[in-house]
Amino acid sequence: MSVESGGSSAGSARATDGGRFGRGAEPPSEGKHEFAVIGRPLPKIDAWAKVTGETRYADDFFLPRMAYGRLLRSPHAHARIRSIDATRARALPGVYAVITGADLPRVKFGILPVSQDEEALCTEKVRMVGDAVAAVAAVDEETADHACRLIDVEYEPLRALMSIEESLAHPEVRIHEYGDGPNVHKNVALQFGDVEAAFARADLVREDVFFYEGNTHLPMEQHAAVASAGPDGKLTLWSSTQTPHYVHRLLAKILEMPAAHIRVVATPVGGGFGGKLDPFAHEIAACRLSQLTGRPVKIACTREEVFYIHRGRHPVLMWIKTGFTKHGEITGCHLRTWLDGGAYGSYGVASTFYTGVINPVTYKIPVYKFEGARVFTNKPPCGPKRGHGTPQPRFALECQIDKAAEQLGLDPAEMRKRILAEPFTKTANHLTVTTIGLGECIDRVVEASGWRAKWGGWRSQSEGASAAPSDNRRRGVGIACSAYLTGAGTAVYWNSMPHSGVIVRADRSGGVAVLCGATDIGQGSDSILAYLPAEILGIDPKDVHVHPADTSLTPVDLGSYSSRVTLMCGMAAIQASQRLREVVARAVARKLEVDPGALAFRERKVGVPDDWEKAVDFAQAVELAEAMHGVLAFAGSYAPPKRAGKYKGGGVGPSPCYSYSACVVELSVDEETGEIELHDVWIGHDIGRALNPLLVEGQVEGSVYMGIGEALMEGQVFRNGVHKQPSLLEYKSPTTLETPEIHTFLVETDDPEGPFGAKEAGQGPLLPVIPAIANAVYHAVGVRCDEVPITPEMILKGLELRRRGKAARVGPERIPRFTFKEPVVVESAFGQPADAIAVRPFAQ
Amino acid sequence: MIRLPAFTYLAPRTLDDAAAAMASHGAEAMLVAGGTDLYPNMKRRQFEPTVLVGLRAIRDLQGVRGGARDGITIGAGTTLSAVAAHREIIAHYPALATAAGLVSSPQLRNMGTLGGNVCVDTRCNYYNQSYEWRKAVGFCMKKDGAICLVAPGSPRCWAVSSSDTAPVLWSLGARVRLSSTAGERTIPVEALYRDDGIEYLAKQPGEILTDVLLPAADGWRSAYLKLRRRGSFDFPVLGVAVALRMDGRVVGDARIVIGAVASQPRPAPAAAAALVGERLGRELITRVADLAAGPAKPLDNTDFTHPYRKKMTRVFVARALASLAGLEPAGRPAEEVA
Ligand SMILES: Cc1cc2nc3c(=O)[nH]c(=O)nc-3n(C[C@H](O)[C@H](O)[C@H](O)COP(=O)(O)OP(=O)(O)OC[C@H]3O[C@@H](n4cnc5c(N)ncnc54)[C@H](O)[C@@H]3O)c2cc1C
Ligand code: SF4
């Protein structure tokens, strides 16, 4: 795999200067390209532990007297609970405790304040196969397992609703009593400008229907938690979670105990991807069981349970209508989405908005209307998965653009370049975009892939390019682009506190400790928390001790989601490090009798560059500072700029800045078997600045890999109310053999909002992969797959249609009969200049 | 984690001890070789033996003996990695090396044995599921229940023979040696199988498969193509084994055996017969492929749709024949890199 990076010109038209805490954090005496740590391909600070198997995940925790817990889960997709009798289980030797919902306070909870619809252990109804109804703590897992089988639950089965259509067609069956209508969790409509007028201005108006099947995160590490209630009445939970802070808040509510008496520690997370962002039954049950037994209790979920915990990609049905001029410019766009939410709210309200609000960030869409509805079904709840709500509409828009390009006779790469959003402007839906490196991303992948020769104009589609005349395989290339947020601009609960906090502490050892609530889920946030202070203080990242994700010790960070960590923790870490640096500089300046501003921090020394022999060791510098100032512990805080659009729903979508990606895929399709083989993926990603190109490359490749799975095979599929294949073997996800060569190009736009100019890398690069594959399939064999995953069966069906002289399109035929809300009508803010970057909260 | 149930593990060092252990523990006991099929199945409570008779310590079950000229004998305990890498097998029984090398994943092939692969349990996606899952759906007759969920109303189980090597061994005319306290017998591999998802082996439970015997290579050429979603890891949902011997410019003899479309490997004798005495050309191949696909009756209990698997039978037979005829490369069977 190859990576290249380079500076960009596309994003350089800057509205304001970055200020002290953005790029401006560079040490004054060191030039832009002379960083000691930033931009270097260093190993992750936890790399050694990971590769040698030393990392201690939640399931590796063993405490004295620890009991093992297990959850009894519902075998019914939808049923009323008549009774639960645990007598036989309690009598089993080795069983310490059995609890049901009756042993927990009767409070419903949910990650979003507007969707408080979950119970850790269901008391009245189960809403999916896998809903937990009871929990056991026992001497070992086998006994706990056995005890679960001895719990007698009497159910009254209810009709299970397993699809959007079914749930809408049966309003008499209610999965929940709340929501925006029978089985409708959320119904939203936003309008920015007059779409009908925009369509009237267009030379071409397309309406298309797409379907994106749901899929799951598939982290290697299965969820696990250990709870320990102390004799002092306090409670500690170690859990594989992406968001210890939210779990902490909700545990206090669920267990009805003061948050001050609860400590949540996130253990190293073996993959999250959004699947460990809610409070879960196993965590809550472990806590309660520990309180009741006085023993630490561990609950480690099985792979099958992880499929039921889910919170993964929503299946989304989409209708999209877009007007194009003959040059390819978009005059307006109207998008409708129906989300299959599964059994609970989770992040669903946010997901619903996300299916609509990010599309306008990529291209010039002057007028925009979005209607979305999330429907409850009796399946594991959907939620945030890498790209949260945006891969689905991205697939729809990018495939539609491809179709429009063909009708207009335009090169789809050229067409996209022509319609790129303008840096430092607002979108129709009032989102402020800053730098945009997408044009360069497109240039890089177009050039590297040999796009022009390979694409070669819109050919008659019965004439796919084939390697050899006798070969059944036809080659094709496809292109798509995307944008993604670098951190959600608002927290999941309303507050005006920092989104992230960092404490940097130094002492005479010369070591620096960094405390931050952020959780490293494999993306490398712990490493970022070492690199940034090391850069600013001129020390080696190895001298930094990172202490993450412990609600008793570390300042609050909201969690590892929405690609917010590097930016938000990074900014807080920069601020805290700067504060430390100032104090150290003052002390050293006094000793050397120079101006503090003249000092450089590098090579573990502090001194004046021109008189470097006099420079003092960092440890000694800290000693001087400690003597002068007292204990050296400095805090940094970060909250994103407040730029939400002033309309209801405007809180979802704003972000300090957006990353951009462009992707070209080359593949071949076997016309006899329908099998697709990927050859190469070229992906350009506007990263703002690669703080560590190696980590960015890892995130980009991981995203591409995950996108391939969603495009070609992964599907959360149900049969008779039950997940059809809840196992790593039968839930098909690509292996290394299905992963083609990935060529990564990093484009640096040096964004004024990001730490040293950095944007996100963890999610955005997934987005263009799926439509690029669909577009390449069309280029290869002339079959339009308006549905993912694209299976061999679909290809053969498309080819068969073509043979019969019909439109070779495979995808959903209908959209549900459904009335959306009256839209919130707001004027389009399209093209307005971005507001000058105001002083950020907590900047002083 | 799903836990294995408790069981007693016996590790006999000789075949006789193993046979005796099987005889004395009766229906409570099962044989285990690499355990790559049995242990996961036990975790899901598809089997609940209380005694396992391990074969790994028995020397006599290891290794490949003999040569292609007179036929070779492969100990049942030989790992799939060893079979796939064996020079004589690669050179003279290439389909077997291919099939062994396409089983599951490199790690599992290092543990999994040829004997275990020949005896591997039949599969069905209503059955290869945890106890809790099967309970939620309703147990089926293969384990804990009374009906078939794929073909309700059917008196039998249609779980799918999912061994990669079985159809190849059948097409190569292999025989297997079985040993028990009652003595030893050698039978053609096809006599080992029955078309029943539950009782898929026509041997006594106490009989140990000790060797696989391949006849002299004698000019036979062979090919194996496997259909699965991914290039590794996945069981076959269709396996096509073709062996043929040319007689001058025409086909002298041929066997076609299709795997993973029924509860046992399914031979296609009419198709094979149509090859004999003919020159291997494209037209003939198309005709033979149609004939071979005829008997394949996959049901909807594996990955991919069953009409697709049926359709692919024709394509895969044609491709296997074409590759043996030197007409085209053999598709993409061997994606696995060991
Ligand atoms: C993820 C995964 C993927 C897999 N993919 C494939 C695949 O693609 N193709 C495939 O064919 N298989 C596959 N398998 C199944 C299995 O790995 C292989 O079939 C392997 O060859 C089994 O050999 P073993 O020695 O491990 O058998 P074991 O698990 O030890 O035994 C399997 C069965 O054979 C019996 N048995 C074993 N040895 C003897 C003997 N000498 N005499 C009599 N009975 C015996 C056992 O009692 C048991 O019933 C897969 C398994 C897993 C877990
Ligand atoms: S074929 Fe029928 S009986 Fe056999 S395992 Fe499948 S569902 Fe059960």
Image (cartoon, coloured by chain):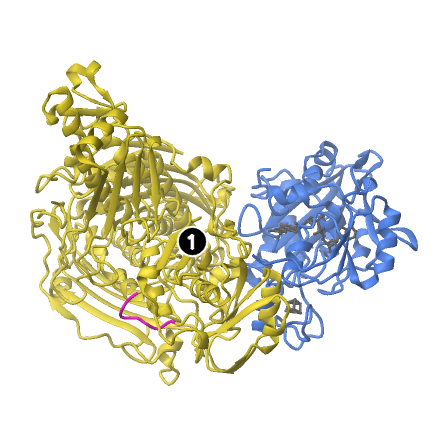
Chain colours: A yellow, B blue
Closer-to-camera residue (B232/A348): A348
The residue drawn where x is 60% and y is 71% is A149
Closer-to-camera residue (B48/B320): B48
The residue drawn where x is 7% and y is 52% is A832
| Badge 1 element | loop
Which residue is identified by label 1? Answer: A240
Is B66 above or below relative to B268? above
Q: Amino acid at mark 1?
A: Ser
Residue A296: x and y in percent read: 49, 59
The answer to whether mark 1 is within 8 Å of ligand 1 is no
Reply yes or no: does residue A42 show up in magenta: no
Q: How many marks?
A: 1
The residue drawn where x is 18% and y is 51% is A640
Residue A161: x and y in percent read: 43, 76
Q: Is residue A376 left or right of residue A305?
A: left
Residue B321 appears in the figure: no
Residue A218: x and y in percent read: 45, 54
The residue drawn where x is 33% and y is 43% is A525
Residue A234, quarter of picture: bottom left
Which stretch appears magenta? Answer: A112-118
